[in-house]
Amino acid sequence: MTDKTAITLTVNGSDHHIACAPRKTLADALREDCGLTGTHLGCEHGVCGACTITVNDAPVRSCLMFAVQAEGGDIRTVEGLAKGDDLSPLQQFFIDEHALQCGYCTPGFLMLIEGTLRQTPDISEDELDEILSSNLCRCTGYRNILRAARRALDHARTTTPEPAA
Amino acid sequence: MSLVGTSVPRQEDRPFVTGRGRYLDDIATPGGLHAAFYRSPYAHAGIGAIDLSDALALPGVVAIYTAKDMAQLLPGGDRLSTGLPSSSIAFPLDRPILPADETVFVGEPLVLVVAHSRAEAEDAVEAIDMDLDPLDVAPDLASAVAYDAVPAHRDRPHNRLAQFDFDYGDHAAAFADAAHVVLGRFEIDRGGAHSLEGRGVLAAPDLIDGRLSVWSSTQTPHALKKHLCRLLDMAEDAVSVTAPDLGGGFGPKLVTYPEEIAIAAAARALGRPVRWVEDRREHFLSACQERAQLWDTEMALDADGRILGLRGTLLHDHGAWTARGLNVPYASGMMLPLMYEVPSYHLDITVAVTNRVPVTPVRGAGQPQATYVMERLLDAAARATGLTRDEIRRRNLVGPERMPCPRPLLLRSGLPVVLDSGDYPATQQSALDACDWAGFDARRAAARADGKRLGIGLANYVEGTGRGPYETVTVRVARDGRIKVNTGAAAMGQGVGTVLSQIVASHLGSDPARVDLTLGDTAEPYGFGGFNSRQTVVAGASAEAAAQVVRKKVLTVAAHLLGLPEDSLEIDGDRVTVAGSNSGRSLTLAEIAGAAEGLPGYQLPGIDSPGLMATERVVIDGMAFANGCLVAEVEVDAETGLVRVLRLELAHDCGQMVNPVMVDGQIMGGLAHGLGNALCEKMVFDSENQPLTGTFADYLMVTSAEMPPVGVSHSETPSPLNALGLKGVGESGVIPTAAAIASAVEDALSDLGVTISTAPLTPAALRAAIVAAKEART
């Protein structure tokens, strides 16, 4: 269980050749072995959603997935949202709507919304609101996050999604 | 141009939305080691033999420290003395870094394991064989102070850590003369802070110069530095403490913890970086908690519904160690009568040691409980007198004509409490108007026709903010013309950096993007950090003063260099220009800063001391009291006890706002936390004081699904206590919420005769109250 296995993780379009123990979670592998610390751990039991990323466009809790399970998948993290210095519309909506304070849960919410809108661009507002209740935030009281998410939904409805880089 | 009062965008946001925040566990230390703690599985046990042989043999294990080993690493003592002084405390309960003989709560750290990875450290923790001899515990708060109670510490005589009172006026006469007396017994449960990022610490010794660098997810880096210097017997300039980005604080990160000391000691002993990052289970078990209190209170009123007196008892759960002091029960007792005209008051407070996680402030710090009790009593008084709930409050609130209003109460410093400013009746009226209080009966009737049971409730409150004595702020215009701000104020996620940059930039060119901040700076010898909704007030006051001094120097030097009078100049962005002139004559701040430094053999340019720099520590002894009124509308299912909050309307006054969007953000977050306290957040312990809520699956926090639409309206009555008229806001939303919800739920069930006296009001608790009311009627 503690012997390391060589795997390749494809994160934000780049391959990371890493060696990790089979018991290592995807979240830990992203943070420790790929150097991508934007994915945060809030509970490590799959409730708070701070560690949410997307794998093949589906939002997943990276604390509940082993790194070895993600090999071959298209893994996306918060670090992949902006293009260079240009923030994605969703990131800008979070800033504009004051949808973050300490920022710790923010990557999880961003990737939850990103994955949801990629998978279901025609989702209803009520369904989107319901999905957002799967992540926890202690700072904002959520209303501004809902506003930012709704703006992202409006944006998704009126634009053709760009293929991920 | 002043930026105070404008919602400038937060400096903090861009790194956070791009994954470039730098939280404690994001700091890379190649070759660094990881730690895990063996934590007590018992609430109370004697510690016997410890066998580490299996654990030491596991792969990756570097070192294991028991209490005895740890004491060797701590020449300055192996206990944390973090309590605020009080003559009421009967016996000291300073926390050991690792206890040697006895453990007193589930989750207490007993042994430290250092290994190459966290997983290996945890494996070794599992392999530690420790003889623990379980001891009896008092099963709940009330029984802990019974005269035959088992002491939570076997070498202490009892659990009554402190007994003190608040007392003024002739309460005996008040109750003898009363036309009405209402009473109530109120029970508020324990909850946690649950910042999404837990605690964490990383210590890295420098083997060349012997210095120790420590990063901690703490609200008070200065306090941690003081404790490290003392316990490790290190000089002040040999230790630096840095708080990186904090993934939330909410109170518990304001005290220094044994883990922070133990990790620093181990890193020093091993000569390598060592980190410990709290996981959620550890946060449930070992991060400080709050709120558990039992109140027995009564209120005397005259025939017109004017309060004559208030008296009763408060039993406060202190937890197993003194990790902060008596400040939480003190705040509760001070707050109870504070915003109403209460001519006589007597409250006996007993602080009980329990075999549970130590209690220190969680957002609100004793104020939500007092507000709950006072507002519940006022609802009962409304029923007894036949007045409406808003009218009885109107008759008793301290009026604006009384401001500033000295109260017959003392701050913990011994100074009298003075309500500094505010119009409480007007604030209440704003909240009532915002939610159409007068039209509620029609809404209730319409809902009732649809088979729905609605209720409306309100709660007034004040929030003590801006705890002094001061916070240090240094403002300097650097050689490159950028504005450097160093302060003891610590960021904990609320955006204090943006606030300070607004205040400073207002005097130095009005561009907050030109301000670079170093927060929680322990290179500065004097500072405190983040707690008690204080930083915008006290650091803001120092920032204002320092920026004004630097502005004056900038203009003096520029006037000298340009040969123009100072009052003809203005600072605009990165340069000083001639006001109202298009002459093109100007100097950049960089040029002025260069000149102000001086040249060998030349006179300074018009100034007495070199440089464009000022350090200020504006001392503010009094507290700035923000106030508000929250109205809640709820729907209650009387069959299941489920409460759905339909709407919240908060009228609020925190003086001059610096950044209104961020003020609203603070309020919204506080309201969400308050809703948790009102309805669902509850630490459950069994009769052995074993926590039964150890995950987010059984300790329920409010999610977006439970968060109702919220309206917030502001008035801005300046505080006379600081130049900008500021008051704090960080704990505002959390204080009135449980009280307003209880008022609304009771209103929804008024025909059933249900009275609400507990928080949180879980469906099970409410259903039990409904059943009890029904049984009482039959």
Image (cartoon, coloured by chain):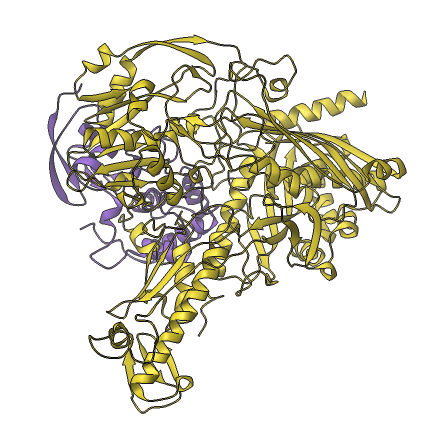
Position of residue A51 measured from the top left corner of the image (x, y, whole percent): 31, 37
Q: In the drawing, does residue B370 fall left or right of residue B724? A: right
**Tint applied to chain B in the drawing:** yellow
Q: Nearer the viewer, residue B225 or A103?
A: B225
- Asked which quadrant contains residue B508, the reply is bottom left
Position of residue A43 measured from the top left corner of the image (x, y, whole percent): 36, 31
- In the rendered image, the residue lying farthest to the front is B601
User: Could you tell me which quadrant the N terminus of chain B lies in?
Assistant: bottom left
Q: In the drawing, does residue B666 fall left or right of residue B198? A: right
Chain in purple (letter):
A
Q: Nearer the viewer, residue A69 or A19?
A: A19
Q: Nearer the viewer, residue B457 or B103?
A: B103
Position of residue B93 measured from the top left corner of the image (x, y, whole percent): 49, 26
Q: Which residue is located at x 45 percent, y 54 percent?
A: B471
Q: Tell me: residue B569, above or below residue B326.
A: below
Q: In the drawing, does residue B385 fall left or right of residue B606? A: right
Position of residue A114 measured from the top left corner of the image (x, y, whole percent): 31, 46
Q: Tell me: residue B279, above or below residue B572.
A: above
